[in-house]
Each structure stands twice: as structure tokens, then as C-alpha cells.
Image (cartoon, rainbow, N blue to C red):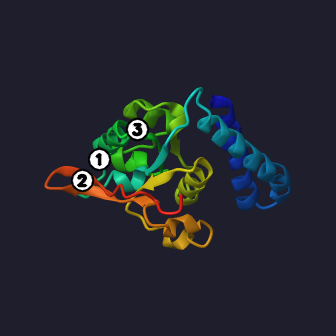
Amino acid sequence: MVAPAVLFFTSFAGVVAALALPGWSDLLMIAGPAALASLYLLLRALSQRPGTTPNWVILDGSNVMYWRNETPDLETVRVVLAHVANLGMTPGVVFDANAGYLLFGRHQNDRAFSERLALPLDRVLVVPKGTPADPFILTAAHDLGARIVTNDRYRDWAGDFPDVKTPGYLIKGGYRAGRLWLDLAPAQGR
């Protein structure tokens, strides 16, 4: 599982470099297809579990961490992960690059969050600095046939990811009177 992730992040870094650095645009011809191919391999590896078909759900970690008391708290993410797992879902979580700074005062990578959340490394992603997490979340959910736990509406991405308009695709949640709630209405048309 580590190999597809390493390939994806290496090739994605090449795409970023090709777009950001003058004179490096030719790198895009190699890094672009490599990023797409390695993303496919990574998602395929994530979706293949012997003898089971996971009921995937993707947590928007940078959104969920604010659900309790409107301050960033990793315990909130842990509680939501445990809750959806207890409901028979297989969770993954994606964080913005700044999540570590908000929670711990310094950058935290995939491995650090994996350890802090007691979640397998292949189910945790911290997106690269300067890159929005939204397209990673939406692509992973689409490719895995997953729903997304978030209060974000993803309106800016609805043109590219029309599933966000499907009732029940986005699982809203939060805390009321100190108790976690999730709107688990089934996604229509899925």
C-alpha cells in the first residue's frame, strides 16, 4: 500500500513543480500521466480488501475537527471516526496541509496523523501545502463510491463533482447538547 501512495505523491509533486516553476513545464508531460496512473493504483489498492466490500466514507478532517466548540480538536475527529466505524463504515480522512499547525503548532504528515488517530496509514491523507483538500476528498469519494462526512457544501466544486448535489451524499453532523449527531439519511440515486 505504501508504494502507490509514494508514487502518487512524488508524481503529484512533479505536477506542482511543473506548474509553479518557470522552465519546468515539460515535466508536466511525464508527471501528469504518472500522477493520474498512480492515483488510480492507490484508489484501487484502497478499495481491495480480501473477502469484503468496504462501505467507504471519507471524513473532511479539517471540517470535522471544528464540530465541537468551534475550535480545532483532534478528539472530535477520533470520535467521528469511531462512530462511523461502529456503524459498519470504513473511514478514511483527508486534512488540509495546515491541520497540524492548527492542532499542534507545527506541520504533521500522513504518518503523524495516522498514529494520532490509530488509523492505518493508507486511510489518512494530508494534502500538499498550497493545495486545496476539496478535490482530493471529492475524487476519493467518487472513485471509492463513498459518502463524505462534512458540513462543507462544496458549491465551488459542484460543476466537476455533481454528486455533491445528491441528497444524502454529504453527511452533515456536529454536536448538540454535548452529543455527536450525524445526518445519515441514505444517499438518493446511489
Q: Amino acid at mark 2?
A: Arg
> Mark 2 or 3 closer to N-term?
2
Label 2 crowd (10 A; few <14 / some 14-19 / many >=20) = some
Residue 123: give x, y in percent of width and height. 51, 38
Q: Where in the figure is residue 103, as x and y percent of width and height?
A: 34, 46
User: Is 6 situated above or below 152?
Assistant: above
For the residue labelled by badge 1, is the local secondary structure a helix, a strand or a loop?
A: loop
Q: CA distance from mark 1 to mark 3?
A: 24 Å
Q: Which residue type does callout 3 highlight?
A: Gly
Q: Nearer the viewer, residue 168 or 174?
A: 168
Question: In the rendering, which numbered label is found on residue 26?
Answer: none
- Which amino acid, by three-letter code, is at mark 1? Asp
Question: From the viewer's perspective, is the residue at label 2 or at label 1 nearer?
Answer: 2
Nearer-N-terminus badge (1/3): 1
Residue contact at pointers 2 and 1, CB within 8 angstroms: yes
Front residue (pair 145, 67): 145
Q: Give me the residue at 59% from left, 55% from top.
A: 142
Mark 1, residue position: 73
Mark number, residue 68: 2
Closer to the chain start, of discs 2 and 1, is 2
Q: Residue at x 22, y 55 (%)?
A: 175
The Cα atoms of the two marked residues, 2 and 1, are separated by 8 Å
Say if 159 sits above or below 97 in the image. Answer: below
Mark sitting on residue 88: 3
Vertical placement of 27 versus 123: above or below? below
Q: Residues within 10 Å of mark 1 (few under 14, many from 20)?
A: some
Left/right of residue 121 with respect to residue 62 in the rendered view: right
- In which quarter of the view is residue 39 placed? top right
Q: Is residue 10 visible?
A: no
